């Protein structure tokens, strides 16, 4: 692969605040870009800094319009675009990802349309063949396990929170 196409970018941490939907769930709040997760089962709240925080009043559309284009740019320049969405069961993440107007369908549609347009431009200029390949992976984080949703196997990968950070086993 042409090294000029690879544009490494650091991981961005984006948080969408959602009010707890039931008693006993963690309460997530933010002051500026500092996020606090107050889990009633934990001794003390966990805090971290995010690159951007969407408030509870922000719509999924706000997040999609702002966060999808940089991911698509990475994918279309030949690198991977990864989106990790986490939240309580029954939260907004399923709608954000899989609804007909969600990130998953929009991303696939926009990538396919752009690749088709590039292929058409390439052909109309009289150049040789132009091919592309799309590959999609969809995982679900369930507790401390990552499940591949596009296979029949239900093998999981375990996430372990260590002092050095989250480690995948």
Image (spheres, rainbow, N blue to C red):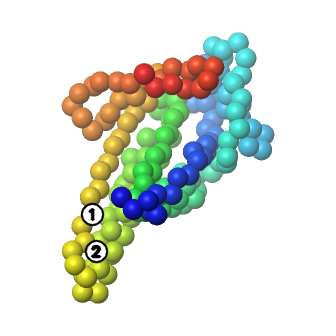
State the residue at coordinates (61%, 43%). 13
On residue 132, the disc is: 1
Visible residue check, residue 117: yes
Report which residue position mark 2 lands on: 119
In the displayed structure, does residue 114 sit left or right of residue 68?
A: left
- Up the image or down, 123 lies above or below 37; here it is below
- Secondary structure under tag 1 reads loop
Visible residue check, residue 106: no
Q: Position of residue 156 (x, y in %)?
A: 34, 24
Q: Are marks 1 and 2 in contact (CB under 8 Å)?
A: yes
Q: Residue furthest bottom?
A: 125
- Up the image or down, 15 lies above or below 43; here it is below
Marks 1 and 2, Cα distance to the nearest angstrom?
9 Å
- Secondary structure under tag 2 reads helix
Q: Earlier in the sequence, mark 1 or mark 2?
A: 2
In the displayed structure, does residue 54 sit left or right of residue 78?
A: right
In this view, the residue in front, 35 or 22, is: 35
State the residue at coordinates (49%, 40%). 84
> Looking at the rendering, in which quadrant would you find the C terminus?
top left
> Looking at the rendering, in which quadrant would you find the N terminus?
bottom left
Number of residues whose C-alpha sits closer than 10 Å to that of mark 2, classed few (under 14), some (14–19) or many (20 or more) = some
Q: Position of residue 144 (x, y in %)?
A: 46, 21
């Amino acid at each position: 692969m042409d090294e000029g196409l690879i544009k490494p970018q650091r991981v961005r941490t984006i948080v969408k605040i959602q009010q707890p939907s039931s008693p006993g769930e963690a309460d997530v709040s933010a002051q500026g870009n500092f996020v606090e997760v107050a889990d009633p089962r934990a001794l003390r709240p966990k805090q971290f800094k995010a690159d951007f925080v969407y408030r509870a009043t922000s719509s999924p559309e706000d997040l999609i319009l702002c966060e999808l284009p940089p991911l698509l740019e990475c994918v279309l320049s030949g690198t991977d675009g990864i989106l990790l969405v986490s939240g309580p069961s029954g939260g907004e993440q399923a709608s954000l990802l899989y609804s007909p107007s969600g990130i998953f369908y929009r991303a696939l549609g926009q990538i396919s349309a752009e690749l088709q347009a590039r292929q058409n431009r390439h052909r109309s200029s009289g150049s040789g063949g132009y091919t592309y390949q799309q590959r999609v992976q969809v995982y679900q984080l369930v507790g401390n396990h990552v499940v591949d949703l596009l296979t029949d196997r239900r093998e999981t990968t375990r996430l372990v929170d260590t002092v050095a950070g989250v480690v995948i086993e």
